[in-house]
Amino acid sequence: MENPRLENLMTDIKLYNTKTRRKEDFTPIDPDNVRMYVCGPTVYDRAHIGNARPVVVFDVLFRLLRHKYGHYNVNYVRNFTDVDDKINAKAAETGRSITDITDETIKWYHEDMDALGALRPVHEPRATQYIPQMVKMIEGLIASGHAYASEGHVLFDVNSYDAYGALSGRKLEDMRAGERVEIADYKRDPMDFVLWKPSSGDQPGWDSPWGVGRPGWHIECSAMALDLLGETFDIHGGGLDLQFPHHENEIAQSCCAKPSGEFARYWLHNEMLQVEGKKMSKSLGNFFTVRDLLDQGVPGEVIRFVLLSTHYRSPMDWTSSKVKEAKGTLYKWREYLTGAKPSEPHPDFISALGQDLNTSKAIYELGVLFLRWMNTKSYQDADATIKAESVFLGSAQLLGLLSLKLGEWFVGDYDFSWHEDRFLVLRDEAMDTKDFTALDEMKKALTEAGVKVSMSKEGVKLEAGPDFDSGKIVDLT
């Protein structure tokens, strides 16, 4: 018998590596332990639609990697930054504790990203859980001459790392002249960045060799990645806005702290999102959160579809017309689902995803698979129809679409035609055999699922009630 995993390993995955500026064959360090780190949110407010793009993009990559290397062989880490000056400012403004704010915001984040069908990463570390690891890394950087303490701060010496700027393609001389950098007396060079800074008053702080303080932003990810993924791991992802300075600084401090490692081997960055052709901005009135969209009645599955309809490395324009088109497409697909079980995705679909995560091409391939499925219906070949639906569904669900959970939005327009036809068949059989067991069982199952069953001489009519749960009738065959 053929091994499905061996077949999956034949699927090539090519990824555009920002580090080398070219597409490369993805070859993990260890196929039994594929490791990926993605920068997560700073938790002080709701996630806006732009924040959702990397979540959905890297969720698809997570799914693809698990499909190829095995469900339990992919270690995906995405952090929460829960110590930050924006959080401190919100605490001071509202009078609430920092813990209350960060706990609530993480809860919101999970609810909103769950609504988009994003799988939870294997690990979701909070920065405040890794302060000792950060202090230890900073001590090592000072000892090796790559960092220095000054006036309660600890700073990384960018001149001590020759490769600084390689990821973003920038030179130190140009950055000093063109970048907005903090000029401070305690810095040797304006480009030196903070690893540790002093805390006072109501600011959160931890004891350290340099006094009570808190970590700088960049050191968090380096310490958490080292602890959870090791000195060298496979993929580091995030938005293009993080390439400099955040990712550049991560590389510098990580490679200097552990010179025997490479840190991340493949760097992936998604492009930015705009709304109706303009940069998203509160002043323009086109700024909205994921929760805003959900509360306005835009289904999470539709949001996901729109985000995946543009290749991740291309700038994305969120428009109302794209939302309408996505909802229409998903409605059409869901309208014909009969409850068949998903099978292995189609090779053409996998090939599209394997080409640098080309989700727009993958969605096109889903459209082709849907048409093939519809064509089998005209041949009246039940086996072929079920097989075609299963392949279509397996492909869609690898993209995170057409799951039962994400289908809750479809309740109001649920197509009961198949169930009505089935009910009539059972009723006719019952009238002939005088055995109403199967008919009564189906009626009971429909009622328990919140379906209103109306029978008359003309036939049967099924309608969704206020408590309708589509997931409970999927298996009624």
Image: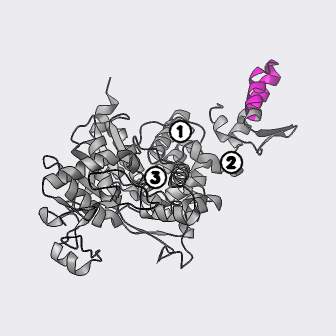
- Residue appearing at x 35%, y 46% in the figure: 130
Viewed as shown, does residue 334 lie left or right of 102?
Answer: right
Find numbered disc 2 in the image and state the secondary structure of the residue it sits on: helix
Camera-side residue of 146 and 325: 146
Above/below status of 446 relative to 247: above
Q: Classify mark 1: residues with Cα within 10 Å, few (<14), some (14-19) or many (20+).
A: some
Q: Which residue is under mark 1? A: 385
The x and y percentages for residue 193 are 26, 65
Residue 46 x %, y %: 53, 60
Find the distance from the CA under tag 1 to the CA under tag 2.
Answer: 24 Å
What residue lies at 29% left-to-right and 50% top-to-bottom?
134
Q: Can you tell which mark lies on residue 368?
A: 3
Q: Which residues are magenta?
A: 424-446
Instruction: Say whether residue 342 is left or right of residue 176.
Output: right
Q: Looking at the image, which is closer to me, 419 or 31? A: 31
- The residue at which mark 2 appears reads as 411
